[in-house]
């Protein structure tokens, strides 16, 4: 009963504050309208000479501020829209629905009417209401990266936290508070933009801006305090059901998974989708990345430091450190358990056989695809990873155009070829090449620092051997792709490439060996051809990596 009364009190508070915003805003608009009417009446009807132009200036140059307030009233006050994603029915995802509804019953929350999957490494709940009271729909959004990055208990803790907002009817207050804060932000931003464009406008819109600034501070101070308290209470609700250790682990895990997912998208998913290539199951490569020992160690170190993610001005979530401290303050919690939780066993949900319904990946990945051009959608994910490994090095070859153009005296910049780099080394211009690579930052995306002439030559040789079917690129999660050679001739060519970088006298022998391998040393190597894979999957392959 007390929780119900508290929920209604919070909703009433939000409605009062939101009503206050509309009252203040309409007072500013109507006050301006009254001033404009008086000025126009004096000028057009009464005919009385105005002793000062200030009222007329206030009408003319105060109009942009009033228009900004009106935009806040009619556009900024809308509830946040649902993220792009794909709704799944009970028939399409019975296991997911069963988990969510079971947890809803356990925390005493109403069940969501819609579950929507998104590409964000996050989860959230929202409600659609009629006039701020009757609920017409309850929506739970679950980011698919959480299915690969969280353990079972951590995922349950995240879902319990969100359902706890339903149990306390926090979503109704949050939606109302968000609308008010967004409306105030829209109005104040509009006034500031108008003031920057004209000094007179700035002078005559200062009063409106000051009034809204004071009210925005009051609105956020009251509503954010309540909303942050709601987050602590939702954490406590999750801890009561799945345990404080699992809840604390989930809080840090969500941030770590979010960082890893952003890295995965930036390095693989988005660039490959830009080439029209998508995997049949993007979660499998992501789980492989999280399970890689080197990557897991780096992610665990990042997690121990618990860096705070960047936050929007409208984000009312408390700092992670405060949420962890609140969970650790529970009496009886041993001191040694208050340290940062250890990393979870990655990919547990994926390994348990959680499969997304047909068509979900198509809906989620379609916005990442280019509007036109060739596409290969739903590629087997292991094959997609091989293509991604080569695409990384193809990009490195493409990026060589910049430093080579700096060293060219021709009107037409040279193509990124083996001959182009070997020619510079043979001409004694290795130091110039190193300087151009450094100045253009070549290789920074691959190696973290500008690459060397040795790396440039080995990358070109590797791409040439890959195109000739004598080698292939193998993806590494914590370093650029490694070259895998399939025969002794290709292996000797790679060794000669390293020798030629230090001793240009080995360049002629390298050219001969590459020709025997079927590599055209004068052909541009900045485009992806048919993928080269070991014939029949047999034979001995040797893995090489640029130093």
Image (cartoon, rainbow, N blue to C red):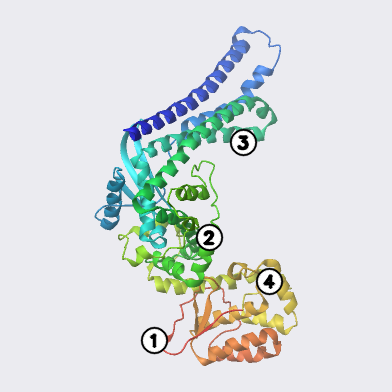
Quadrant of image for the N terminus: top left
- Mark 1 residue crowding within 10 angstroms, few (<14) / some (14–19) / many (20+): few
**Horizontal placement of 360 versus 57: left or right?**
left
User: In terms of secondary structure, where does tag 4 sit?
Assistant: helix
Q: Position of residue 268 (x, y in %)?
A: 49, 66
Q: For marks 1 and 2, give the one nearer the viewer.
A: 2
Q: In this rendering, does residue 73 appear at all?
A: yes
* Figure disc tally: 4
Which circle marks residue 536 in the picture?
1
Residue corresponding to mark 3: 193
Going by the image, does 213 lie left or right of 317?
right
| Front residue of 65 and 227 | 227
Question: Of 46 and 271, which appears nearest the observer?
Answer: 271
Residues at marks 3 and 4, CA–CA distance in whole angstroms: 42 Å
Residue 47 point in image, percent of width and height: 64, 8
Asked whether disc 4 touches disc 2, contact meaning CB atoms under 8 Å apart, the reply is no
Q: According to the image, label 4 marks what residue?
A: 437
* Helix, strand or loop status at disc 1: helix
Q: Check if mark 3's residue and mark 2's residue have beta carbons within 8 Å.
A: no
| Marks 4 and 1, how far apart at CA | 39 Å
Of pointers 1 and 2, the one earlier in the residue sequence = 2
Mark 4 or 2 closer to N-term?
Answer: 2
Sequence-first tag of 3 and 2: 3
Q: Closer to the observer: label 3 or label 2?
A: 2
Task: Return the x and y of residue 342 as percentages of the image width and height.
Answer: 47, 62
Q: Position of residue 396 (x, y in %)?
A: 58, 71
Crowd band around label 4 with a 10 angstrom C-alpha radius: few (<14), some (14–19), many (20+):
many
* Disc 2 target residue: 304
Looking at the rendering, which quadrant does residue 461 occupy? bottom right
């Amino acid at each position: 009963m007390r929780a119900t009364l508290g929920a209604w009190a919070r909703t009433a508070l939000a409605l009062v504050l939101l009503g206050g915003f509309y009252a203040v805003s309409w007072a500013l608009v109507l006050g301006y309208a009254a001033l404009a009417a008086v000025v126009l009446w004096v000028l057009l009807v009464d005919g009385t000479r105005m002793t000062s132009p200030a009222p007329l200036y206030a009408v003319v140059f105060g109009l942009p501020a009033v228009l900004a307030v009106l935009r806040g009233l009619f556009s900024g006050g809308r509830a946040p829209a649902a993220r792009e994603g794909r709704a799944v029915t009970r028939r399409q995802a019975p296991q997911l629905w069963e988990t969510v509804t079971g947890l809803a019953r356990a925390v005493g929350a109403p069940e969501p009417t819609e579950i929507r999957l998104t590409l964000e490494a996050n989860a959230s709940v929202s409600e659609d209401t009629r006039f701020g009271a009757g609920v017409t729909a309850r929506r739970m959004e679950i980011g698919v990266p959480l299915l690969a990055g969280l353990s079972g208990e951590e995922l349950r803790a995240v879902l319990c936290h969100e359902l706890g907002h339903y149990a306390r009817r926090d979503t109704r207050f949050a939606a109302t508070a968000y609308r008010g804060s967004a409306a105030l932000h829209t109005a104040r931003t509009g006034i500031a933009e108008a003031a920057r464009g004209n000094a007179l406008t700035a002078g005559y819109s200062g009063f409106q801006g000051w009034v809204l600034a004071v009210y925005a501070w009051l609105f956020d101070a009251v509503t954010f305090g309540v909303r942050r308290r709601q987050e602590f209470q939702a954490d406590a609700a999750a801890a009561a059901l799945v345990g404080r250790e699992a809840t604390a682990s989930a809080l840090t895990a969500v941030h770590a998974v979010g960082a890893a997912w952003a890295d995965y998208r930036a390095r693989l998913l988005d660039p490959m989708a830009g080439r029209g290539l998508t995997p049949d199951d993007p979660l499998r490569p992501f789980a492989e990345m999280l399970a890689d020992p080197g990557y897991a160690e780096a992610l665990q170190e990042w997690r121990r430091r618990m860096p705070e993610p960047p936050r929007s001005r409208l984000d009312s979530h408390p700092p992670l450190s405060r949420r962890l401290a609140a969970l650790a303050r529970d009496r009886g919690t041993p001191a040694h358990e208050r340290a940062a939780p250890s990393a979870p066993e990655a990919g547990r949900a994926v390994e348990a056989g959680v499969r997304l319904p047909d068509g979900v990946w198509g809906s989620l990945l379609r916005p990442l695809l280019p509007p036109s051009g060739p596409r290969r959608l739903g590629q087997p994910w292991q094959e997609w990873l091989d293509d991604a490994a080569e695409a990384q090095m193809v990009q490195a070859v493409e990026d060589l155009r910049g430093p080579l153009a700096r060293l060219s005296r021709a009107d037409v910049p040279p193509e990124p070829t083996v001959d182009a780099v070997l020619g510079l080394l043979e001409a004694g211009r290795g130091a110039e090449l190193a300087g151009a690579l450094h100045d253009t930052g070549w290789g920074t995306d691959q190696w973290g620092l500008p690459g060397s002439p040795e790396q440039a030559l080995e990358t070109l040789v590797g791409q040439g051997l890959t195109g000739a079917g004598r080698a292939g690129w193998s993806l590494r999660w914590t370093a650029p792709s490694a070259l895998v050679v399939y025969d002794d001739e290709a292996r000797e060519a790679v060794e000669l490439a390293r020798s030629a970088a230090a001793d240009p006298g080995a360049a002629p022998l390298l050219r001969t060996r590459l020709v025997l391998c079927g590599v055209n040393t004068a052909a541009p190597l900045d485009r992806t051809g048919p993928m080269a894979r070991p014939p029949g999957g047999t034979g001995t392959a040797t893995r090489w990596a640029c130093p």
